[in-house]
Amino acid sequence: MKHTFLNLFAVVALGAMAAACASGNTVGEKRASVQKMRGETLAKLYRLEPGSRERIRRSAGYAVFSNVGVNLVLLSAGGGHGIVRNNATGRDTYMNMGTAGVGLGLGVKDFRGVFVFTDRKALDWFIEHGWDGSAQADAAAKAGNKGGAWAGAVDVAPGIKLYQITEHGLALQATIQGTKYWKDGEMN
C-alpha cells in the first residue's frame, strides 16, 4: 500500500511538473512560450491591481513564474518556469523552479507569481544565485487598497515583493516555502 501511494504520487507530481514546463521543441519555441506566459500574466495582474504596472516599471526588475503543484494527502511537489527582466538593461533571464513539501491536502494548484525587485542587489542575487524560498514564512497580503502603496503584494524577502495570481484573482496569502529558483541552462 505504501509503495502504491508513493508511486501514484510520483506519477501525478511528474505529470504536473511536465505540464508546467515551457512548451515547444526548440529553444526559440520554449522562449516564446515563456514570453507569452509573461505577457498574459502581466495583463491579468494589471487588470486586477492597476497600480502594479507603475510599480513594476519603476522597479529594478521583475520576474514572472508559472507554477503547477500537486498535493496528494501528505506530500506536495511542483515545478514551473519563468523569466526575469532587468529593467535597467532590458535583459531577460530564463529560470526554472521546483517545490516540495509535506502537508495535508489533495489537489492540483496552478498559479502565477510576479516578483518585483525593489532594489538592484535583490535582483542580481536572484538571477546569479537563484533563490531558496524554504526559509521564508507565509505572508498575508492586505485586502483591497487599505494598508499602503503595495496593496495586493506581499514582502517575501528584503527588496522583493510578490503578487500571486490564481484563477480567482490575487491570492490573499502567498506561500513560497520549499521553493527553489535557478537559471535555465538550456534557454539562456
Image: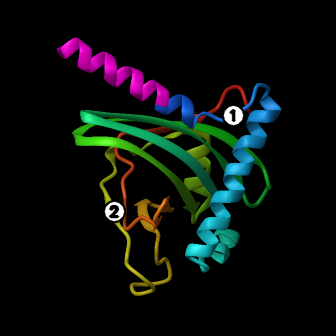
Q: Main secondary structure of the magenta part?
A: helix
What is the x, y in percent for residue 95? 62, 38
Which disc number belongs to residue 137? none
Separation of residues labelled 1 and 2 (CA atoms)? 31 Å
Q: Which residue is mark 2?
A: 139
* Mark before the other along the chain sequence, 1 or 2: 1
Disc marking residue 23: 1
Crowding at label 2, few (<14), some or many (≥20) Cα neighbours within 10 Å? some
**Which quarter of the image is occupied by the C terminus?**
top right
Residue 137 shown left or right of residue 121 in the figure: left
Helix, strand, or loop for circle 2? strand
Image position, residue 134 (x, y; %):
35, 42
Determine the image quadrant of residue 24. Answer: top right
Residue 167's spot in the image, x, y percent? 49, 59
Q: Secondary structure at mark 1?
A: loop
**Magenta span of residues:** 1-15
- Would you identify the image quadrant in which residue 99 lies? top left
Per the image, is 4 magenta? yes
Residue 12 or residue 177, whichever sits in front = 12
